[in-house]
Image (cartoon, rainbow, N blue to C red):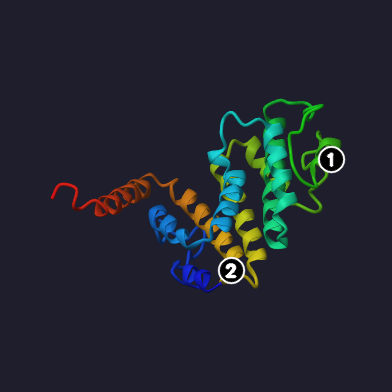
Amino acid sequence: MPKYVTLMSSLPPLGQLFGSTQTPLSRLKLENRLKLLDAKDAERLNRIANLIAWSEQPRERTDSQFVAEANQLLAEIHNPTLEGIISCRLDLRTILVALRRRHRGETAPPVGQPWGVGRWVNSIERNWNDPGFGLDMMLPWVLEANRLLKANESVALERLQFELTWKILNRFSFGHYFDFEAVVIYLMRWSLVDRWTSYDGEVAVQRFRQLVDEGIEQFTDVFA
């Protein structure tokens, strides 16, 4: 669509995930650009974001509710690229959740209730006591994630998760440059850069001041 060509052309390159000190545009500016989305696509984007934005999950949402919402979205998406991205993100999330459950002392996966989503749930349940859940031949990073978790290397584990997600997005980005899929991928990448750069306290303060300044600019006539 021509408007999506305009939208994507207005978004600055994000660069490398770990090579930035701040996002190339603020959340406020990004949200303003996203107003070019059609209403239907904006609603789809919101559903996807609400599902995979882990840090913003409602506290009252149960595992069963999350699994049900994930399966419903995957059944309705009807888009191979978006379905692939969401499935891979959910696979990653499920494995990390299982690792954390086991690390905190759970000797077996939850019984009689949904706790994860995706193709690896059965393998994880069968191989709960195996360090890599029996997945290390296909997903060697699982052993590294397990090691980092046991060593309480939380930042390194987060970095690994970001690297894996970035690679997923790179894989699905080919052929998508000026369409809705490109918008979704850009937003996911932007979120990763935003979260990683926020770990730096000094940078976070600078970005906060920048956001405040940008917000004030919109109300320059309030006290005129």
Q: Is residue 160 above or below residue 151?
A: below
Residue 207 pos. (x, y %): 35, 51
Question: Which residue corresponds to mark 1?
Answer: 122
Q: Is any part of residue 143 visible from this angle?
A: no
Would residue 64 appear left or right of 218 to someone viewing this image?
right
Seen from this angle, which residue lies furthest left?
Answer: 224
- Direction from residue 75 to residue 156 in the image, left or right: left
Q: Rounded to the nearest whole Å, what is the CA distance between mark 2 and mark 1?
A: 35 Å
Q: Which residue is drawn at 43% across and 58% down?
A: 30
Image coordinates of residue 139 in percent, x first then y, are: 76, 52
Residue to which mark 2 is pinned: 179
Q: Residue 11's spot in the image, x, y percent?
A: 45, 66
Which residue shows up at 15% across the image and 47% down it? 223
For the N terminus, which image quadrant? bottom right
Where residue 219 appears, x then y in whole percent?
A: 24, 51
As shown in the figure, which amino acid type bears the numbered disc 1?
Asn
Crowd rating for badge 1 (residues with CA inside 10 Å; few <14, some 14–19, many 20+): few
Side (left or right) of 107 relative to 56: right
Category of crowding for the residue at label 2, using alpha-carbon neighbours closer than 10 angstroms: few (below 14), some (14–19), many (at least 20): some
Along the line of sight, which residue is nearer the eye, 54 or 158? 54
Name the image quarter holding residue 39: bottom right
Q: Which of 207 and 102 is in front in this view?
A: 207
